Amino acid sequence: MGSRIGSRVKELLAPRSFRHRLMAASVVCILVPAFITLIVYNSLTEEAVKRQAVANAEDSLQLVNGSVTNVLKGMLNVANYIQVNSDMNAYFKLLTSGNDDGSDPYEKFMARNRVLQQLDSLTVLGEKFFVTVLLSNGEFFTSYSADDYRPLSWKNHEWFGRLESLRGFQSYWSPAEPTAFGLEKLDHPYQLSVGRTLRKENSEIYGYIIVTTMEDQISSIFGRLTAGQEVMLLDGDGRIVSDRDPSKIGEAYPYPEGSEEAGSYSIVKRDGARWLLARQPLPFNDWSLVSVQPYKEAIVNISSIFNRVFLFQIASFVAFLLLLLVLLREFTKPLARLGRTTSAVQRGNLSIRSGIRGQDEIGRLGFLFDQMLDRVQEMIAEVSETQARKRKAELKMLQAQIHPHFLFNVLNSIRMKVMRRGDPESAKMIASLSKLLRMTISKEEDAIFLHEELDLLASYAELMNLRQKEEVRLELDVASEAFLVKVPRFFLQPLVENALVHGLKQRAGTIRVSAELDRLFLKMTVEDDGAGMEPDRLAALNARLNAAGPPSPNGRGGAGAEEEEDGTESEAEGSTERGSAGRTAGGADRGAEGGRERRTDRGVNGGMERRADRGVNGGMERRADRGAEGSADGGARGGSFSGIGLLNVVERMRMVFGDGFRMSVESEPERGSTIRLYIPRKEGARDV
């Protein structure tokens, strides 16, 4: 019951006319791309909004980074000045060595006063820094009052011991710590310090440089240069070094490290909200600046523009869709009328006409449809007359046929009568001819087994030996598993005929046919020990064989067909003409090893022996019109058996097996020729 209701609903919803289907297709073709476009637009818009928000956050953070870098760089400049000042360092070394004990007290006072003045001058301009120089002998120099903070107390700080590992201009930046200077504690709760070592030429430490600034000098920058963002300075361990909220200093970074994007920014979720985080490292230590802002606040101004564009696009899609439906209804009115006319014709009303005319495709369709109805009666009469003529033609064809068995029986009777008269050679010639005709006439299928093709080849060799004066020896070297491979009929006979006529020139010699089977191909060779051919003719022949393709629809072959038509192919093909390319050593004397059956001077059927070295002429006149210059296109003009040339063999095989079939010729002058065939074991794709 439920299935019937469902099918009924589908039937009601399915469009019943071309007009409705066209409208439905148009709606789908409009709505689906529109929907996809809106989705892509929304995705791209969201990405663009995100990039703009990130760019704004990074620009603000870049301003903060520049100001913070200037403050910290100022601290490094103070340390650098003290470290590279030769007069100050010479005085510090003199003090730590103890060689100034005999100096004049006034000179001592003046020298010490000069150092203090230089330290004070470093902090007069720009940011306020607290400079401390501690010597290894316990003496110290400061830019602040020792009553405000005892300089030797720096050695009690936890991080002071890490200065021992510093070399050269290496610096150690201390984490934020409570302010140690008495006058600064109330207004500046935290301080930041950078430390360096003073070393002699032998790397012995003779003093320390400590430059300190108040943390709020950095956090005040955050408030001046950013709006709506929370900015903090983190050390290498992820702890807050500076923040506008002093209570957060020293705490761990509160936001997770997981992010949607890789790089200098990330979007993280915390407490059910999304936050935009931007990070920029400082250039001279492992500290970094981080800005935090709610993602909604970062994109609110940008996304409103895209939302208005989005609504305008939706309204445009709806308006144009309604307009399209109206136009489609008007355009398809002639089609609906033509549909009603065809329904009337289907019911048998051949007198009705659509009356649709116009210059467009529908107008021409209506006119042609009316013309078609006008000719229906004429076509019915023509079809009836054609069928009558066809039946008469078939009858004449049946009357003209000769039953093949009658022909074979007559030939067999002639052979028996010739044998009774004592002429066995003529009888064998008639028997071989009968077998060839039987294979040619009685087989309807195009493909036969390889052993049947070899039987045909042996019979052909016997006939040729009876025709010519000198014997030709046919050797078959075929693997037993190859006998039952299906091959096209008469594909070997043209190759052997070329070897006989053009390679051996109808003189004595040996033609060897071998076959072996592997996983992909049936590999066959046809070789002779005849005249061979010159290298230039061999190259031209192989080029034409490679270019040959399946026959064209007009019955002519592929490449080289025009040459065959003009009869100019006798030289180029007369060299297959002369057989096939040079045989590799050892190919002709393969034995019966590995399950392979060596067949020499034998046919393929049963145990019946066929001698391919029979005497010549057996009462038959040798055909003198087959010279060494015969055409390779089959010799139909020269009295050959099949009229099939090498190019036609290649075309037939490629038509059956596709481009997987290959044939090549190897030859050397006066050493014979070899034709190699690679026949795919599976039939190749063919064009119909």
Image: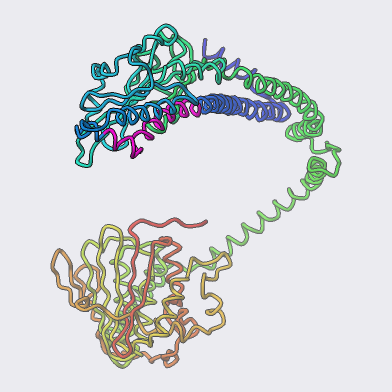
Is the magenta region chiefly helix, strand or loop? helix
Q: Is residue 526 above or below residue 68?
A: below
Please provide percent x and percent y for residue 617. 32, 91
Q: Is residue 317 visible?
A: yes
Does residue 284 appear left or right of residue 125 in this picture?
left
Q: 355 and 218: which one is in front?
A: 218
Magenta residue check for 88: yes
Q: Residue furthest top?
A: 186
Residue sitting farthest toward the left: 593
The image's colouring method is: rainbow
Relative to 78, is 277 above or below? above
Measured as percent of width and height from the top left, residue 295 is found at: 53, 17
Please tell me which residue is depicted at 43% across the width and 70% down the height of the picture.
650
Magenta span includes 400? no
Residue at 58% over, 19% down: 299
Q: Look at the image and give the residue range highlighted in magenta.
A: 65-92
Q: Image check: 325 left or right of 200?
A: right
Total marks in image: 0
Residue 332, picture quadrant:
top right
In the image, 105 versus 442, the foreground residue is: 105
Task: In the rendered view, tell whether residue 143 sits above or below residue 561.
Answer: above
Between 563 and 144, the one nearer to me in the picture: 144
Q: On the image, which quarter does residue 531 sit in? A: bottom left
Res 421 seen here: no
> Of residues 628 and 440, which is closer to you in this image?
628
